[in-house]
Image (spheres, rainbow, N blue to C red):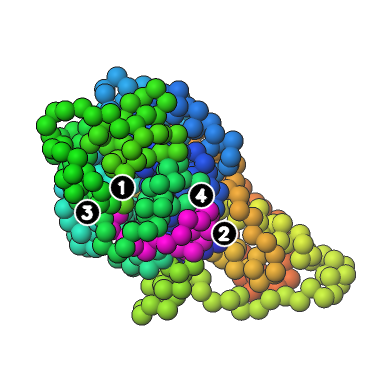
Amino acid sequence: MNSPLKTPLCDLLGCDVPIVLAGMGGVARSELVAAVTSAGGFGLLGMVRESPDLIAAEIARVRNLCTRDFGVSLIPAATPPELFAAELAVCIAAQVPAVALFWDLSLEAIARLRAASILVLCQVGSTDEARAAVKAGAQVIIAQGAEAGGHVRGTTPLRALLAEMVPQLQVPVLAAGGLVDGNDVAQVLAMGAQGAVIGTAFLATEESFAHDYHKQRIVDAPLGAALRTRAFHVNWPPDADVRVLPNSVTEGRRGDPFSGTRTLIGHEGARRIWLFSTDSPLRDMTGDFEAMALYAGEGVGGITTIVPAAERLRSICALAEQVLGSAPGDLAKDVTNADEDAEPASCVCYARQSDDLYAGFAPREEILVFLNELLEAERAGARITARTALDAKDERLVALMQDVRRDEAHWCAMLLRWINALQGTASPRIGDFYGKCLAISDLHERARFINRGQGWVVKRLKAMLPRIRDDALHADLTAMLDGHDENIRRSETLLCGPSAAGAAS
């Protein structure tokens, strides 16, 4: 999927579109995560208070169902310390690409994840919390507005929170809270968010692990139905707000939530579900679903059907692209390919390929293979430089990696244009270079390896350029060669200079 919605965060997460499945506890299991991820988004497994064995099994199931990156969502404050330590250990041992943390800031958890080269996302409810999370090492911030379903951290409406937070942070910001359709996604992208975290819309999908009762209540809910309450509190820190659909509990018909009385209302296997607990109805539960926490965000009235997750993702993206494409000021223009809107100046005619072959020019099929080879390499380069820029502390290395990432994204856009112009099919793959490079923990050595990757591209371009017949394509590939040469020179100056060792820290 080559979407105009793509933002720099997509390269960091390894997704095609900046739509992240919220890590809804119990609901976001392997089937839903794999469905969203395979369709081009980024899925988070909701594993709050789950056993290490279940987490390991769910990670394995996602990997069996899809080959793309995904993450795991954990909540330290709602998990006994021994269990949380075991959950974290499972994620590190499995080398999940990303872990999202929520509620209280866990400095130790962030440090352990960063040491294991796992991307850290932190969901916060205020700009102060965001700054503290970034200082602790968070590489992506999820700004949760007051409109969110489930547990709600802050009190500021999402749009106001984004307006305040985005200009103050140097890391990517994802928007969360009441977002259900393409209009919502277009709005937050236009405000500077690099993606949207969506929960309610994906809860009401075929792959969701939510019970059918919960899904149907989402579909039947009118606009404005979701409300904020503290009635569902068992298993969570005190004074924690949640947003749910109204039921007998929120209407006061089930007694005082804080009386201390325990009333059994259901089971999940041998585990007991108590009245006023934070458990929501799941597929494998039995009991009084009406009295459970029916989580939903403020956008709940916009969900009217239960569909496959991939279909929901596609409809969200299609509307967002339409809205952004017609917005004043061309808000759809991606920061990674802002100057790549025009079609190639010319497109070679391959009707006389025999003449081309006789003259030594490459045929269309060979050129397409070559362009896709470069595209996979540039995708890998964009992603690893984005990751390295977040990992590094030396300002010179950060600036270099950010510049190289912008160049790599620029060349990805150019290659895609030419593949489309030649009526080819763009490869969806990310080059193996990314995995090899990420395995290098020493950032100084990683930067050297990135430089060698730039050199590989230069060699490939020099070998192919004499065989490119079309002047416009030749000019674009020459510019790509020059750009890589310049980045190699800049990298060598930094890496080989007298203070090069500081670049690794």
Describe the element under mark 3 as helix, strand or loop: strand
Residue 312: which numbered mark, if any?
none
Describe the element under mark 2 as helix, strand or loop: loop
Q: Is 202 on the left or on the right of 137, as rendered?
A: right
- Front one among 110 and 257: 257
Question: Magenta stretch: dominant SS?
Answer: helix
Q: Is 247 on the left or on the right of 281, as rendered?
A: left
Taking the spot 26% from the left edge, 23% from the top edge, the residue there is 80
Taking the spot 21% from the left edge, 27% from the top edge, the residue there is 262
Q: Is 65 on the left or on the right of 129, as rendered?
A: right
Viewer-nearest of labels 1 and 2?
1
Judging by the rendered image, the residue that carries numbered circle 1 is: 295
Residue 436: x percent and y percent? 55, 36
Residue 12: x percent and y percent? 44, 48
Please state the extent of the stretch shown in magenta in the rendering.
297-317
- Front one among 191 and 158: 158
Judging by the rendered image, the residue that carries numbered circle 4 is: 206
Describe the element under mark 4 as helix, strand or loop: loop
Q: CA distance from mark 4 to mark 3?
A: 25 Å
Residue 227: which numbered mark, if any?
3
Viewer-nearest of labels 3 and 2?
3
* Nearest to N terminus: mark 3 or mark 2: 2
Describe the element under mark 1 as helix, strand or loop: loop
**At label 3, which amino acid type do we have?**
Leu
* Nearest to N terminus: mark 3 or mark 1: 3
* Nearest to N terminus: mark 4 or mark 3: 4
* Dot 1 crowding, Cα within 10 Å, few <14, some 14–19, many 20+: many
Residue 1: which numbered mark, if any?
2
Q: CA distance from mark 3 to mark 1?
A: 9 Å
| Quadrant (top left, top right, bottom left, bottom right) of the N terminus | bottom right
Q: CA distance from mark 4 to mark 2?
A: 22 Å
Q: CA distance from mark 3 to mark 2?
A: 37 Å
